[in-house]
Amino acid sequence: MIEEGKQSQQQQEQHLVLTVPSRSKQMTQLKQWISVIPIYSLTMVAIYIGMYLQYCYHQDIDQQPSILDLTFQSDDRSPSKIYRLYTYSLLHSNNSHLINNCIAQLFFGGLLEYHSSSWRVTIVHTSSIVFGALVVTMHNQIYHIHDSYLLGVSGGVYGLLSSLVTTLILNYHELNPYLRMYYLIVVGLWLISDILCYVYYYDDHLSYAAHLGGAASGFLSSFLCYQNIKQQRGEPILIFIATLLNVLLFIFGFVVLYY
């Protein structure tokens, strides 16, 4: 009986030893699946849709002071309104404006979150949104534009698009050849379509300044934020220059906004 008890105890211990790795493997697989989900992009798209349905759908933003206060207005330079540098991106003017930005956010944001991580994409996206508004301030001052407001996350989307270029620069040789070609095609189509739309379908209601500002900050900030798989010679200097230039541009933008 004692020997049988020892044998059964040994069998139980072996069973435990065998089951622990399988549970660990399951947790690892679960973490891998979670890491694939573009958490940030999905969350932001849900917020855009919710804000649109609540405040913008079938309603005139001009007639809603509380919502108009969330848009960015370069004429109002009160430091207490600094939140507008970001909140304007949560609102959209119409269905097509919302749908286009949501699709781009999910497509490019999801791709970048898979390659880097959600928190890195969050920083780049937020930086692009804020700097897009700062460039609009500079543009409006140069061209003496007043009584206008900015809304929509297009600047942030352009920041995500331009950060694809940074990903290619930092990890060109390390990327899978098919993924590298895919990135090149996406960036090429984006540049061609954007130039053609600007030349042949210029729209006064679009804020090209916000697009440009978002693209510039997205490109520069992602040098520091995005994952560099294998550091090549000269890349640390390139990252330092890009980061310094991005910081200087932000300082200049805030000086223009408040002084």
Image (spheres, rainbow, N blue to C red):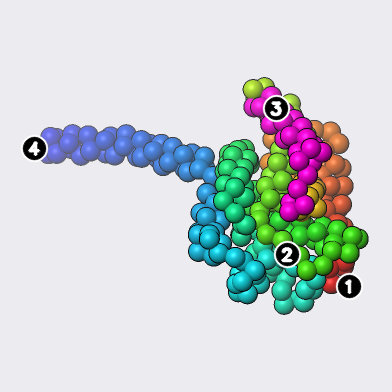
> What amino acid type is highlighted by mark number 1?
Tyr
For the point 59% across and 54% down, which residue is it? 94
Q: Which residue is mark 1?
A: 259
Contact between labelled residues 4 and 2, with CB atoms less than 8 Å apart = no
Name the spot of residue 31 as percent of width and height, x first. Answer: 47, 42
Q: Which residue is mark 4?
A: 1
Name the spot of residue 95 as percent of width and height, x first. Answer: 57, 51
Q: Which residue is mark 3?
A: 185
Select label 2 or label 4 by which is in front.
2
SS under mark 1: loop
> On screen, 208 above or below 63?
above
Q: CA distance from mark 1 to mark 3?
A: 42 Å
The magenta span reads 179-206
Q: CA distance from mark 3 to mark 2?
A: 34 Å
> What amino acid type is highlighted by mark number 4?
Met
**In which quadrant will I find the C terminus?**
bottom right
Select label 4 or label 1 by which is in front.
1
Q: Residues within 10 Å of mark 3 (few under 14, many from 20)?
A: few
Q: Quadrant of residue 188?
A: top right
Q: Earlier in the sequence, mark 4 or mark 1?
A: 4
Select label 3 or label 2 by which is in front.
2
> What amino acid type is highlighted by mark number 2?
Tyr
Q: CA distance from mark 2 to mark 4?
A: 85 Å
In the picture, the disc for residue 149 is 2
> On screen, 184 above or below 160?
above
Q: Quadrant of residue 38?
A: top right
SS under mark 3: helix
